[in-house]
Amino acid sequence: MALSKTSIEILADLVEIKMLSMEMRDHEDERVMAALIQCRHEIINMAKNVRGVKLVPLHDPHGITVAA
């Protein structure tokens, strides 16, 4: 089952919100951030197969840039 354009954009937004709201305090936070980065990469790859999805690069205060 494929996700719709709207669903992909919402999922990307939710992952980004989580990434931006995290406070990096320990190794567990680093593991969670790595999983979120991987998740966003997977969403971006999924979006490449759906016409009209608009994802923008993410620049956050943790110094992590995840390109769309």
Image: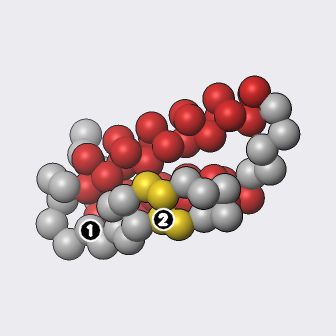
Q: Amino acid at mark 1?
A: Val
Q: Which residue is at a point 50% across and 43% down the rendered structure image? A: 37
Total numbered labels placed on residues in the image = 2
Question: Residue 20: percent from the left, percent from the top?
Answer: 66, 60
Q: Is residue 14 visible?
A: no
Direction from residue 14 to residue 61 in the image, left or right = right
Direction from residue 60 to residue 12 in the image, left or right = left
Instruction: Tell me the distance, in whole angstroms, between the alpha carbons under discs 1 and 2.
Output: 15 Å
For this orientation, the residue located farthest to the right is 25
Question: Residue 59: percent from the left, percent from the top?
Answer: 53, 66
Question: Taking 63 as reference, is 59 above or below it?
Answer: below
Direction from residue 27 to residue 11 in the image, left or right = left
The dot on residue 53 is: 1
Question: Residue 3: percent from the left, percent from the top?
Answer: 30, 51
Question: Taking 13 as reference, is 43 above or below it?
Answer: above
The residue at which mark 2 appears reads as 58
Considering the numbered disc 2 on the image, is that residue within a helix, a strand or a loop? strand
Q: Amino acid at mark 2?
A: Leu
Density class for disc 2 (Cα within 10 Å; few <14, some 14-19, many ≥20) is some
Question: Taking 13 as reference, is 27 above or below it?
Answer: above
